[in-house]
Image (tube, grey):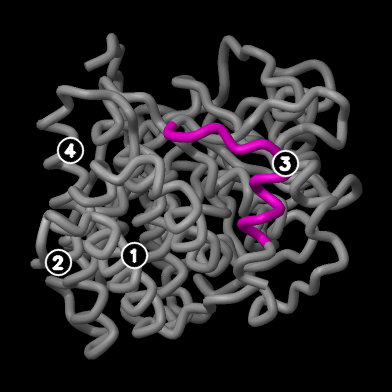
């Protein structure tokens, strides 16, 4: 097990109706907030009225900025930074899923950054402060409600980069599973693929003597898969949504990755799909994850045997580990298909024309400074290209 420093201060407030307390919860921290949200679904669902009524009752003033898209845009972040500075807000309240929360975090650190906030993402520059962020989660997937991470797309440059800092962990997050009831099946599926990938990126590691985090990863993955099918059968299943929501938080708050070398190759490869083609992040991960597994598993059979047995429930002879691994990956592929997730780049509307360009950009080779992806196995641009081509 490797040395680690785990700090997760985000307060998680769970249960029915907790969103109506947002005003009283924020009042000790700010007299004026930015209310940040997406396309307007929170208005149609009635959540907007609940939130604004709660803020007004608590005497918390607010200005608002909607319009966050999946794969949140730098241009809206820049608009939010200017608005926060002008209105002198003391906190950002993100009401939505991971895209809204990631956008809020970018705005929060941009308020105190004197240059172009994109520089922080592009150059991985350190930050010393950010406005506090609070969230009301409407889509369980990204785990951004408790993580210190943010991912932003520069639509002008067609680049998508992530950034992480302890200053970006939310002050508090509210999770009411009833807010998930009206989500379309496609968002359930994409969210499940995303949260599972957050676990996979930490689970598949060469680090030894990590029994506890191995077990946490495996239990989280089994919980996600079981309850995803229950929700698919009944989108109003409160208990199954509760399990999924909590699992999504655990998957990305850092706990299941402590003491182990992490991978993150699949995320690096998928960010290129999102940046160029604006595909749903979870859908891209569903295509790439089994392909990545097939590519790297021959060199890491022990880890993938463990996955096949402990997560996917494969019962077969350990004398034929290759067959056991193949069955485990096949079961994951079949699970994704049960959720109607895509299995090829073609299904995502991606042709072969720009695969090499994406592979070079994913590893930095396109910019003259290649850094291979992955912690389990290093992937250079030629490796990434082969993985893309395998699911074309």
| Pointer 2 or 1: first along the chain | 2
Residue 141 in the image: state x and y as whole percent: 40, 58
Which residue is rendered at x = 62% and y = 66% of the image? 390
Q: Residue 162: within the magenta?
A: no
Real-space Cα separation, disc 4 to disc 1, in angstroms? 18 Å
The answer to which image quadrant residue 389 occupies is bottom right
Kindly check if marks 3 and 4 are in contact, taking CB atoms under 8 A apart as contact. Answer: no
In the picture provided, is 249 more to the left or to the right than 222? right
Real-space Cα separation, disc 3 to disc 1, in angstroms? 23 Å
Give residue 329's mark.
1
Residue 128 in the image: state x and y as whole percent: 58, 10
Comparing marks 2 and 4, which lies closer to the viewer? Answer: 2
Q: Please, what secondary structure does the residue beneath circle 4 have?
A: helix
In the picture provided, is 348 more to the left or to the right than 21? right
Give residue 314's mark.
2
In the rendered image, which residue does mark 3 sit on? 381
Real-space Cα separation, disc 2 to disc 1, in angstroms? 10 Å
In the rendered image, which residue does mark 4 sit on? 214
The answer to which image quadrant residue 85 occupies is top right
| Pointer 2 or 4: first along the chain | 4
- Magenta: main secondary structure equals helix
């Amino acid at each position: 097990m490797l040395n680690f420093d785990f700090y997760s201060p985000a307060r998680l407030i769970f249960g029915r109706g907790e969103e109506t307390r947002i005003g009283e919860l924020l009042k000790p921290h700010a007299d004026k907030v930015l209310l940040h949200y997406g396309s307007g679904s929170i208005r149609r669902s009635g959540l907007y009225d609940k939130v604004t009524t709660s803020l007004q009752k608590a005497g918390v003033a607010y200005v608002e900025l909607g319009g966050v898209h999946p794969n949140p845009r730098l241009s809206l972040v820049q608009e939010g930074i200017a608005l926060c500075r002008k209105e002198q807000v003391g906190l950002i309240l993100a009401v939505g899923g991971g895209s809204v929360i990631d956008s809020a975090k970018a705005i929060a650190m941009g308020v105190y950054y004197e240059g172009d906030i994109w520089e922080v993402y592009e150059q991985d520059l350190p930050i010393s402060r950010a406005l506090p962020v609070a969230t009301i989660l409407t889509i369980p997937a990204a785990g951004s409600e408790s993580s210190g991470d943010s991912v932003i797309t520069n639509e002008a440059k067609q680049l998508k980069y992530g950034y992480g800092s302890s200053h970006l962990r939310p002050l508090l997050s509210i999770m009411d599973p009833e807010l998930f009831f009206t989500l379309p099946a496609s968002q359930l599926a994409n969210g499940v693929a995303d949260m599972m990938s957050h676990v996979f990126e930490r689970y598949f590691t060469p680090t030894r003597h990590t029994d506890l985090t191995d077990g946490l990863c495996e239990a989280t993955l089994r919980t996600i898969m079981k309850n995803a099918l229950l929700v698919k059968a009944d989108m109003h299943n409160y208990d199954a949504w509760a399990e999924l929501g909590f699992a999504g938080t655990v998957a990305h708050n850092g706990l299941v990755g402590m003491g182990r070398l992490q991978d993150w190759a699949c995320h690096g490869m998928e960010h290129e799909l999102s940046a160029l083609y604006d595909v749903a992040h979870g859908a891209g991960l569903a295509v790439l994850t089994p392909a990545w597994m097939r590519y790297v598993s021959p060199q890491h059979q022990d880890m993938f045997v463990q996955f096949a047995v402990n997560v996917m429930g494969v019962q077969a002879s350990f004398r034929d580990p290759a067959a056991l691994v193949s069955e485990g990956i096949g079961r994951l592929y079949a699970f994704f298909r049960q959720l109607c997730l895509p299995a090829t780049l073609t299904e995502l509307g991606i042709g072969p024309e720009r695969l090499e360009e994406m592979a070079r950009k994913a590893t930095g080779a396109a910019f003259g400074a290649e850094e291979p992806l992955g912690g389990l196995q290093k992937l250079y641009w030629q490796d990434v290209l082969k993985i893309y081509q395998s699911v074309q």
